[in-house]
Image (cartoon, helix red, strand yellow):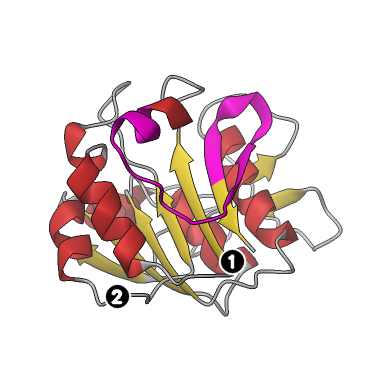
């Protein structure tokens, strides 16, 4: 089986999520093209988030944290498109990186912290991050650990007061800003609420 290993330029609407270690080496992981017009699998929601970051003043965010490693394509995409962003990825699953390295081209493109996200933010210094992405879900449900007043309060405390972006995977609209309001938390003061295409991401930006 031949693998797609083409690396795409900035002018190409696709982004290479996971470069193969060796051309044609499918076990190492093919270069998985993200087509912004594709609605299939994880490619669409990853492209939606990465495209938003790339268009945000050309990757202006310098200190970022991503909750939820998954199989690695989103942190790889962020690293490839915004290499100057200092990204730390937090995931509770100690085996996720091994799986991603074996099958999906993960090569430690960013720092990975194996820890409960709630504990990570509770221990974080205040006003450190200018970008927080919460891509936390268990099958089709956002776990309570990533969706409660204490968690959001600690996230808010860890974020800078301006020039910041908070993004949360809404599972195609199942999770709404009302959930955040019901939790009694305003992540960013004077933030502008946006929705990505098809409500995949809730975006709160404080300019």
User: Measuring 43% from the left and 52% from the top, which residue is drawn there?
Assistant: 133
Q: Secondary structure at mark 2?
A: loop
Is 193 one of the magenta-colored residues? yes
Q: Is residue 186 above or below residue 101?
A: above
Estimate the spatial distance between the alpha carbons at disc 2 and disc 1, rounded to whole Å: 28 Å
The magenta stretch spans residue 151: no
Marks 2 and 1: which is nearer the front? 2
Q: Which residue is mark 2?
A: 126
Q: Is residue 61 above or below residue 78?
A: below
Residue pointed to by mark 1: 80
Frontmost residue, 91 versus 41? 91
The image quarter in which residue 145 lies:
top left
Relative placement, left or right, of 89 versus 53 is left
Instruction: Name the secondary structure under disc 1.
Output: helix
Q: Residue at x 15, y 70 (%)?
A: 123
- Locate the N terminus and report the quarter of the image it occupies: top right
Question: Percent x, y for residue 69?
Answer: 33, 51
Q: Is residue 20 visible?
A: no
Identify the residue at image location x=83%, y=53%.
12
Rendered location of residue 108, percent (x, y): 36, 70
Which numbered disc flags the more N-terminal residue, 2 or 1?
1
Q: In the image, which residues are magenta?
A: 179-203
């Amino acid at each position: 089986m031949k693998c797609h290993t083409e690396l795409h330029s900035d002018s190409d609407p696709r982004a290479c999520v996971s470069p193969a270690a060796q051309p044609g080496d499918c076990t190492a992981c093919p270069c998985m093209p993200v087509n912004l017009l594709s609605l299939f699998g994880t490619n669409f929601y990853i492209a939606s988030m990465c495209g938003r970051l790339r268009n945000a003043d050309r990757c202006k965010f310098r200190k970022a944290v991503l909750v939820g490693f998954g199989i690695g394509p989103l942190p790889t995409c962020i690293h490839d498109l915004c290499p100057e962003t200092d990204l730390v990825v937090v995931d509770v699953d100690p085996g996720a990186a091994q799986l991603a390295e074996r099958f999906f081209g993960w090569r430690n493109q960013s720092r990975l912290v194996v820890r409960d996200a709630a504990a990570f933010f509770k221990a974080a210094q205040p006003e450190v991050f200018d970008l927080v992405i919460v891509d936390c879900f268990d099958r089709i449900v956002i776990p309570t650990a990533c969706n409660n007043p204490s968690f959001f309060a600690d996230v808010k405390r860890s974020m800078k007061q301006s020039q910041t972006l908070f993004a949360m995977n809404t599972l195609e609209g199942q999770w709404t800003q009302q959930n955040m309001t019901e939790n009694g938390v305003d992540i960013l003061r004077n933030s502008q609420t946006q929705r990505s295409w098809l409500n995949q991401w809730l975006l709160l930006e404080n300019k």
